[in-house]
Amino acid sequence: IAENLIESELFGHVKGSYTGATKDKEGLFKSASGGTLFLDEISTLPLNLQVKLLRAIQEQEIMPVGAGRTIPINVRIIAASNKNLEEEITNGNFREDLYYRLNVVGIYIPPLRDRRDDIPMLIDYFLQRFNRDMNKNISGVSMDAMPYFLGNEWKGNVRELENTIERAVILCDGDKITMDHLPQTYASEDSVPVVTNQGLKEA
């Protein structure tokens, strides 16, 4: 996404501020004023926009793209990243002052591979969601497929699991997800087979 579009999404813009800006737009900060704004993957924000984000947090005001005056806001920020922000600071990819401004209360969520007990619950949740979205009635995961869900490294964490379940639901015409519905890489040496007799809704 172009930087000016990211800036517009966050702070809004006025009509004519750039090509395609055919009308005024209220950004996420203004929309969330009086509440909470969740910024996911904060580490991917370009450095020049990190400066503007820092200013918005410190001054509690924003400047929409193309505007001549600031707009007061009152927003609580929750930010998330799958990268180590301290390492990103060392590598010059993230501003240290913004990090300390955001890191008032830090919450560390271990990677999915370190909390494998959560995987069956997450599979069940995503199955229910995609069953509803795609009008299907898949009851669970077959006995042969479950060990690979539990043994996979899930380098993309919950998002990777979510995408895998979505793909499997699309491909599955029966009532169980099997190995035939999973990416071939799941049967590679990168997966650690786990012996289990636990299936989801094995009715």
Image: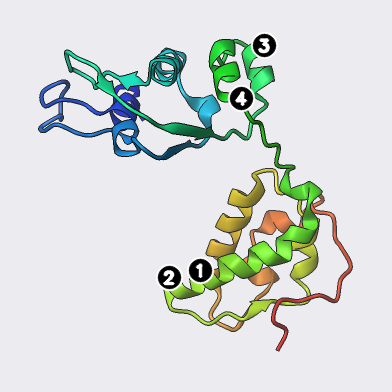
The residue most toward the right is 195
What's the mark number on residue 129? 1
Which residue corresponds to the image point at 69% horizontal and 66% vertical from the top-left? 121
Quadrant of the rendering where the N terminus is positioned? top left
What's the mark number on residue 193? none
Q: Amino acid at mark 4?
A: Asn
Q: Secondary structure at mark 4?
A: loop
Mark toward the start of the polypeptide (2 vs 4): 4
Q: Amino acid at mark 2?
A: Asp
Q: Which residue is mark 4?
A: 103
User: Relative to 172, is 117 on the left or the right?
Assistant: right
User: Relative to 126, is 109 on the left or the right?
Assistant: right
Q: How far is disc 1 from disc 2 in space, using C-alphas?
A: 6 Å
Mark toward the start of the polypeptide (1 vs 4): 4
In the rendered structure, are the residues bearing label 1 and label 2 in contact, judged by CB atoms less than 8 Å apart? Answer: yes
Q: How far is disc 4 from disc 3 in space, using C-alphas?
A: 16 Å
Which residue corresponds to the image point at 61% horizontal and 24% vertical from the top-left? 103
How crowded pointer 1 is (Cα within 10 Å; few <14, some 14-19, many 20+) is rated as few
Q: How far is disc 1 from disc 4 in space, using C-alphas?
A: 33 Å
Which residue corresponds to the image point at 65% horizontal and 77% vertical from the top-left? 140
For residue 177, above or below residue 7:
below
User: Relative to 95, is 192 on the left or the right?
Assistant: right
Q: Secondary structure at mark 1?
A: helix
Quadrant of the rendering where the C terminus is positioned? bottom right
Taking depth in this image into account, of 1 and 183 the one nearest to the observer is 1
Q: Is residue 171 visible?
A: no
Q: Which residue is mark 2?
A: 133
Q: Secondary structure at mark 3?
A: helix
